[in-house]
Image (tube, helix red, strand yellow):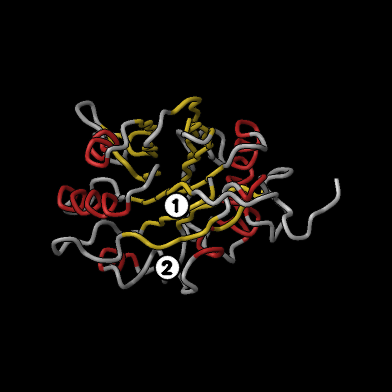
Amino acid sequence: MAYDIEQPYGPLIETTVRVATWNVWHRYGPWRAREQAITATLRDAEPDFVVLVEAWEDDDEAQAARLAEALGLPHTVFRGFPSAGGRDRSGIALLSRWPLGQVGRQWLAHEEHPATATDPGLAVHARVDGPRGPLHVFGAALGWRLGHSAQRQEQVRTLGAFVRQVAGDDAPVAVCGDFNAAPDSDEIRMLTGRAAVTAPGVVFYDAWETAGDGTAGYTWSRANHWTRPVLWPDRRIDYVFSAWPRAGGAGHPVRCELLGERPVDGVVPSDHYGVLADLRY
């Protein structure tokens, strides 16, 4: 088939799906007030699905269920591990407007076993059975330590292989979460095709780079008072990635903005700002 210079993907899809990702900082600080602020912010954003990092659950209740009811996103999945205090579990939650089909989990540990790894990562996958066909959504969290770029590079290779294994090449794919790495790091460059890719044929748009407002888009910012005790520099470390290429431009980001920069009733929702993106679907 001849290459069409004007429509290399065929006619572009004009409809979109709205995805949000946010590290919601477990139950640190005034977490009940923060959760109310998170809920209010997401309610205003009206996402179709949400990836929460550092979500929590215990034997009595789960943050995913609490937010799902408030946001009208009834389909949820949570995968995690015992938190540092051992009283509950911390992990990744996916919330969706539409039913979830296939669900999976992949440890992204760089050591012999995730239970003993000092800086592990986790990915959670769900097939979203949306009104215009399936979408594959992955929530991911990589190791957080500043000096662990080499470990995160191993983790994104495992993540890329996981995406390739379960998602295929046709349906839109969104990979969202807290990557603990700036855009110029080797691990993010691997995901966006600026370095050797994580798996054959697996390369992503960075929604902020493609459709943000042209600012730095820091999601870890010293303007947020929750971050200041950590003494880290401003960085963009939370992402919405979408797989490229797809027919009709499916998955292509057309809009991207930050979430949670403004306090709600005087409360800053989290130590991270979230990311909200509209993708062709």
User: Please, which residue is most extreme toward the right here?
Assistant: 2
Q: Position of residue 49 (x, y in %)?
A: 40, 42
Residue at (49% x, 43% y) in the render: 121
- 10 Å crowding of disc 2: few (<14), some (14-19), many (20+): some
Q: Is 261 located above or below residue 25 in the figure? A: below
Q: Position of residue 201 (x, y in %)?
A: 72, 44
Q: Position of residue 36 (x, y in %)?
A: 18, 50
Q: Nearer the viewer, residue 19 or 184?
A: 19
- 10 Å crowding of disc 1: few (<14), some (14-19), many (20+): many
Q: Nearer the viewer, residue 58 or 44?
A: 44
* Numbered mark located on residue 220 in the image: none
| Mark 2 → mark 1, Cα distance in angstroms | 12 Å
Q: Quadrant of the N terminus?
A: top right
Residue at (54% x, 51% y) in the render: 14
Q: Position of residue 156 (x, y in %)?
A: 59, 47
Q: Is residue 41 left or right of residue 253?
A: left
Q: Is 224 located above or below residue 169 in the figure? A: below
Mark 2 or mark 1: whose residue is earlier in sequence:
1
Mark 2 = which residue?
218
- The local secondary structure at tag 2 comes to loop
Q: Is 11 located above or below residue 230 in the figure? A: above
- Name the residue type under label 1: Asp
- The local secondary structure at tag 1 comes to strand
Residue at (26% x, 63% y) in the render: 226
- Name the residue type under label 2: Tyr
Mark 1 = which residue?
178
Q: Nearer the viewer, residue 179 or 148?
A: 179
